[in-house]
Image (spheres, rainbow, N blue to C red):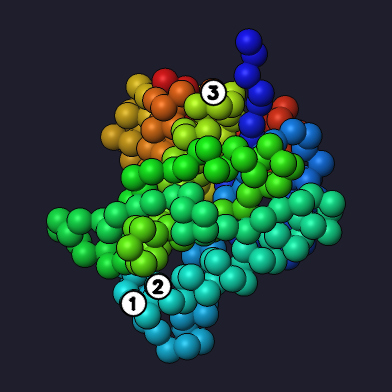
Amino acid sequence: MERQKLLVAKIGGNIIEDQNALATFLRDFSKIQGPKILIHGGGKSATRLASKLGVKTEMIDGRRITSAENLDIVVMTYGGLINKAIVSGLQKNNCNALGLTGADANVIVAEKRPVQFIDYGFVGDVINVNHTTIKGLLDIGIIPVFCAVTHDGNGQLFNTNADTIASEIASAMSEDFEVSLFYCFELKGVLENINDKDSVIENIDLEKYTKLRDDEVIADGMLPKLQNCFDALHKNVSSVHIANADFIKDQTIKHTTLSL
């Protein structure tokens, strides 16, 4: 029997920072028929609020070191300001959304990232996604909107990479659906030349990814994003794309498709 299709979309980058771009994306996302899930980041907003509060933000290789003070700011920003703005924007477009952290309904359990060379602080790595609970929400017509906050089941919240959460949710939901995972941000896809916004690499498989990485064509924040893409494909997600936010309404525009 053919399985029902599910769209899992993650938005980040300057879309969240730009009210008009976010409003346009939410309008387009709301028009998509069928079950769907939205995941969002918000690192720039968290950094800005930390600065206003006089709390130092430390980044190593594009990853946030999450002290106890920074965790408070992350939870306030991701789970509060951004998440509720997105949910209210979806409701404006007659899309019945529910904002969630991983702690809500125990949907995403994580463990503190072990200290190896770097102590990332209160950063969590996902160990379980409760796909049954998420499916229950979808079955009654509710669109889950996840922020980048998880928990360990023992009262501790964690900051968790939003790209990773999107990959893990998409992978878990592939138990019940045929899942397409979209990573949407302000660029058109993975670029061969960061200074040429039209130099989109339209297809990347594992072999090509390895070469692009070794040649340092892709680096920094794009590396973990691509690794999350391939992790999802290895865990039976049907298709994975990196694209401009307009891809939500027009999947014929130039973008990057990942394959094994």
Question: Does residue 96 appear to the left or right of 174 in the view shown?
Answer: right
Identify whether 220 is placed above or below 8. below
Q: CA distance from mark 1 to mark 2?
A: 5 Å
What residue occupies the far top of the structure in this picture? 1
Q: Dots 2 and 3: beta carbons under 8 Å?
A: no
Q: Using the numbered discs, state the Cα–Cα distance from disc 2 to disc 3 in whole angstroms.
A: 34 Å
User: SS class of the residue under badge 2?
Assistant: helix
Read off the residue under disc 2.
71
Identify residue for label 1: 68
Q: Are marks 1 and 2 in contact (CB under 8 Å)?
A: yes
> Which residue occupies 71% across, 30% down?
251
Callout 2 amino acid: Leu
**Secondary element at image label 3:** loop
Sequence order check: which comes first, mark 2 or mark 3?
2
Secondary element under disc 1, as helix, strand or loop, is helix
Horizontal side of residue 197 vs 59, given as left or right: right
Examine the rendered structure and indicate whether residue 230 appears above or below residue 100.
above
Name which residue lies at 79% across and 50% down. 95
| Residue 202 in view, yes or no | no
Of residues 206 and 112, the one drawn nearer to the viewer in this rendering = 112
Residue 238 numbered mark, or none = 3
Residue 137, position as x, y percentages in the image: 64, 44
Depth check, front residue: 1 or 58: 1
Image quarter hosting the N terminus: top right
Give the residue type at disc 1. Answer: Ala
Question: Amino acid under label 3?
Answer: Ser
